[in-house]
Amino acid sequence: MGQIKTMAVASLMAVMTFAAVSCGPSAYTLSIETSRPSASGVDLAGKTVSVVYMDNGQEPDSLFAASMASAFVMELEDDYFGGDSLVPVFCLDKISGSDYFSKSSMAELLVEAGTDVLFLLDSPVFGTDIEARTVPSGDGAYTAVGTIPFSVNLYAYDSMDKRDTVLLFSGSSSANVSARINGTESREGIEYILKSGMEGAAATAGSASGRRFAPEWKSEDVAFFLYDSGEWYDSYYYVNDYQWQKAMDIWMSMLDTPNLEKKACLEYNMAAACYLQGQYKLASDWLEMSKEHFSLPYVRTLEEKISSRL
């Protein structure tokens, strides 16, 4: 979970020798699609996420919020977790006058949920200018048809974001709704029935909101080092197949080498692999060790990539 997604089009480029002697290292470049934070500015890569929706005790509002939260979660799971059900959803009773959206309240909810990021979906607000009419159905019953405007607020708190603040995302739209009625309902009764049938509109709003947090993809090249030996070539093929742990196990097993250039190459490779898995702090630590042992090319480029994600 949390690894940067790789695309099937990624490929290994030609090996480029930079060493002056044949026993030195070579470099190869992995061309790969990596995720960038979404247009919303919220970066969910490598993080655990939970969603809470508010229940204000009004059935139409609660049905809408539950349906929207469900669709929102499905979108996040598709974008970040390969469709696996890894985003828990909670319902919170809304008490009038309580401040659920302050930093302290959001942080408390996040701790209770046990995740890195918390989304809190407020109860919907339905507009008062509802257009509704009653149409005979031809079988003695009637159909109520209406257009209902609505707005929703979504709050996000990321405990790993250096901004350390609660972000607000607002949206509004309107839904065309119809429902079977018996024709004797009051205007208020018809509106209540129509509001209670807005699960489809809520799901559409939830999916649209989720897509707002979808990562953006960018093609980039990341260099790795290679020596002319069996273990190094084994790690080369694991990198090509995105089997990071197997490649890293090989590099770790060779770290006790007295050759400082080789040690630096191993540590650099560890940094590059961590970067491509979204483990940016660990990648930075490995790169610092590499720099201490030997001056290698490509280090500055990788350092800039890592710094941009911290």
Image (cartoon, rainbow, N blue to C red):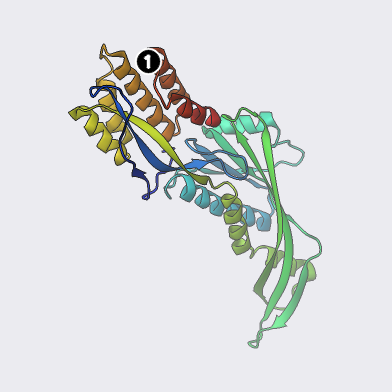
Judging depth in this view, the residue of 235 and 174 nearest the camera is 235
Residue 274: percent from the left, percent from the top? 40, 29
Judging depth in this view, the residue of 237 and 112 nearest the camera is 237
**Image quarter (top left, top right, bottom left or bottom right) of the N terminus:** top left
Residue located at (22% from left, 32% from top): 233
Residue 53: percent from the left, percent from the top? 61, 46
Question: For the image shown, how many numbered marks are present on the structure?
Answer: 1
Residue of label 1:
294
Residue found at the far bottom of this picture: 138
Residue located at (47% from left, 50% from top): 78
Q: Quadrant of residue 273?
A: top left
Up/down of 89 relative to 272, above or below: below
Residue 235: percent from the left, percent from the top? 26, 32
Residue found at the far left of this picture: 230
Judging depth in this view, the residue of 227 and 9 nearest the camera is 227
Q: Quadrant of residue 208?
A: bottom right
Up/down of 269 relative to 42, above or below: above
Residue found at the far right of this picture: 129
Residue 35: percent from the left, percent from the top? 49, 42
**Image quarter (top left, top right, bottom left or bottom right) of the C terminus:** top right
Residue 280 seen in the current view = no
Left or right for 217, reference 139: left
Numbered disc 1: secondary structure: loop
Residue located at (61% from left, 51% from top): 209
Residue 189 seen in the current view = yes
Left or right for 89, reference 65: left
Using a 10 Å C-alpha cutoff, classify the residue at mark 1 as few (fewer than 14 neighbours), some (14 to 19) or many (20 or more).
some
Judging depth in this view, the residue of 18 and 174 nearest the camera is 18
Q: Amino acid at mark 1?
A: Phe
Residue found at the far front of this picture: 20
